[in-house]
Amino acid sequence: MEPAVAIPMADKGVPVVEVSVSAPSHLPGGYIFDAAANGQTFSVTVPAGGVSRGQTFSAPFVPGGGGVSASAVPEGRWKDGLCDCCMFGCCHPALWMGICCRLALLGQVQNRLRLNWLGERANPGDQSPFKVLLGISPLAVVKSVLFSSLLQGFIDPSTGLPIEGSPYWAITAVNIAFNFAVIVFSIYAILLSRQRRYIRERSGIPEKSCQGCEDCCCAFWCGCCTVTQMARQTAEYETYVAQCCSETGLPVSAPQLQFGGTEIV
């Protein structure tokens, strides 16, 4: 959040602090939500005309006006271990999102961090990373079913081997290329977007293993555990119920994140 600027009120002679607020999503004019600044929450009313996700606008800072406490990300440490996927139970939505729809969970974490689907700073009008990555996920499933069906048609039932002269191996090569592309994209989405590193650096978390390439190793060897750990790090699942179909994976009432007492903008 940008530094607050005091603006005097002529009618009461009491200074009102104006702060810059980043819209958590596309909101209509008059909508009220909670924002956080310096560890304190306050209510913000969206100006007339509405705002787009990531758009910044000025609002008066009145501490204590919000209905929820600020969600502070721990400094210098992860909340839990990389393999603590079942910390909130085996039926927790975030766990199953990480298993069945990893990219969609990544999009929810990016929404919490105000990043776009490429892991860069979100700008007003950018598509929600949750929607973009959720749309990509079914394509991988459709691709697998399609190629499996195609390959099965070129197998000799009597021998169980590819029919000689059929395009079996050509289709297999294309399938391998697609699989490689999906793996590369998944690693890129987690690693090259610097999302895990972004969280570590903002939280002051040092690398403990594989110095210099911890983020790469986590992304390559255990993408599911990596994404779910980031989800737990950026949410208070003890207080707010996880949601599969929410753009942030949290209720609307959940406060915005804070690193070191500063709201993410």
Image (tube, rainbow, N blue to C red):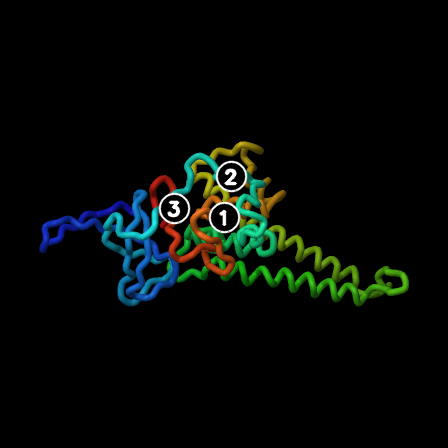
Q: On the rendered structure, is 214 left or right of 32? A: right
Farthest residue toward the right?
Answer: 158
Q: On the rendered structure, is 124 left or right of 181? A: left
Which numbered disc covers residue 176?
none
Query: Of callouts 2 and 3, which one flags the residue occurring earlier in the amino acid sequence?
Result: 3
Residue placed under numbered mark 3 in the picture: 71
> Which mark is in front, 2 or 1?
2
Position of residue 173 measured from the top left corner of the image (x, y, whole percent): 73, 57
Residue type, mark 3 in image: Ser
Mark pair 1, 3: CA separation: 13 Å
Q: Is residue 176 visible?
A: yes
Callout 3: few (<14), some (14-19), or many (20+) C-alpha neighbours within 10 Å?
many
Q: Say which element carries label 2.
A: loop
**Residue at position x 56%, y 32% in the image:** 209
Mark pair 2, 3: CA separation: 16 Å
Residue placed under numbered mark 2 in the picture: 80
Residue placed under numbered mark 1 in the picture: 231
Callout 1: few (<14), some (14-19), or many (20+) C-alpha neighbours within 10 Å?
many
Q: Say which element carries label 1.
A: helix
Query: Camera-side residue: 91 or 198?
Result: 91
Residue type, mark 2 in image: Asp
Which image quadrant for residue 166?
A: bottom right
Query: Of callouts 2 and 1, which one flags the residue occurring earlier in the amino acid sequence?
Result: 2
Position of residue 165 measured from the top left corner of the image (x, y, whole percent): 85, 65
